[in-house]
Image (cartoon, rainbow, N blue to C red):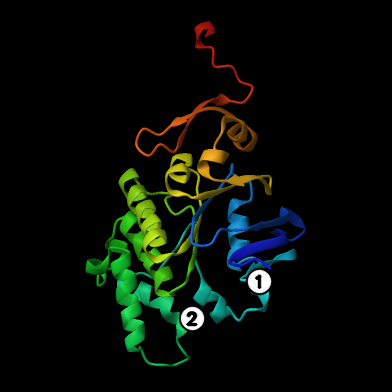
Amino acid sequence: MSEGLAAERLTLGYGSTIIVPELSFALPRAKVTAIIGANGSGKSTLLHGLAGILRPLSGEVTLDGRNTRDMPPRELARRIGTLPQRSDAPPGMTVRDLVSQGRFPHRRLFAPWSDQDERSLLSALKRSGIADLAERRLDTLSGGQQQRAWIAMALAQETDILLLDEPTTFLDLAHQIDVMTLLRSLNEDQGVTVVAVLHDLVQAARHADHIVALKSGRIVRTGTPRDLLTPATIAEVFDVEAMVISDPVTDAPLCIPVARSGISQDRSKA
């Protein structure tokens, strides 16, 4: 039985439409994993299946060898925190109010707010770098600050696994850097297992220890950025011809798109 989060012949879909057919794999514990692939490849569907948001059509998701469907919802929420691609909060909600929602799995019905709840909330705010924004309304914050608030809510759950669906989508470059740096630091400083769906291969190469590449709901390859981000794999996954060089900042692989596969880029004839 696999420790950590794993899938065993996992099939996911909607109604009679299968999106992810019979995947089996294990995610490395206390590492940052990026799930990559073209639009429609099943990335978000897979993440929702791992999080327990989407019920498997067959197969199972296991956590430390236990089928997550056999775990009470509160117990699962104490182990796995999930941040969807789009998150909405009621108008007027403050950062503190939002982050406090992360304590739900640890609180009994009608139980008063405890000292432990307060410590966990303050710790999540501090770890996310937004302690000074606790009383601000969410709708007055920048996109990057709002994303940090949602991450803080997940951290307040005190989970050891964090699943994120395109956490930098809709953010400007500076806030993308802030969010990815935060996720990397949570992993390195707190040992949090981070799994993120990413479109940006530069982010995946710079910040991930492990990459899962999907195409049509199937795993093409898994491995380190250095092993996986090759011209051959990029062509297979994205139908794009690319050069791969060393990133001058991190020495990670840097993918430079050249053309759609099979389309000539000879501009001299144009």
Residue at the image point whose x is 36% and y is 69% from the top: 91
Callout 1 amino acid: Gly
Residue at (66% x, 71% y) in the render: 65
Q: Which residue is more in the foreground, 102 or 143?
A: 102
* SS class, disc 1: loop
Note whether residue 213 is visible.
no
Q: Is residue 184 left or right of residue 142?
A: right
Q: Is residue 27 visible?
A: yes
Callout 2 crowding tier (Cα within 10 Å): few <14, some 14–19, many ≥20: some
Residue 164 on image: x %, y %: 49, 59
Q: Secondary structure at mark 2?
A: helix
Q: Residue 39's quadrant in the figure?
A: top right
Residue 209: numbered disc = none
Give the residue pinned by disc 1. 65
Neighbor class of circle 1 (other Cα within 10 Å; few <14, some 14-19, many 20+) is few
Query: Label for residue 105?
Result: 2
| Above or below, comparing residue 190 to residue 230 in the picture | below
Indicate left or right for 135 with 42 as reference: left
Q: Amino acid at mark 2?
A: Pro
Q: Which numbered disc, 2 or 1, marks the residue that appears first in the sequence?
A: 1
What is the distance, in whole Å, between disc 2 and disc 1 at their CAs? 21 Å
Instruction: Nearest to the eye among marks 2 and 1: give it.
Output: 1
Q: Position of residue 131 (x, y in %)?
A: 25, 69
- Viewer-proximal residue among 16 and 57: 57
- Residue at the spot x=50%, y=44% of the render? 199
Using residue 57 as the reference point, say whether residue 44 is left or right of it.
left
Residue at the outermost top position: 269
Residue 114 image offset from top left, x and y in percent: 35, 89
Please identify the quadrant where the N terminus is shown.
bottom right
Say left or right for 270 vs 90: right
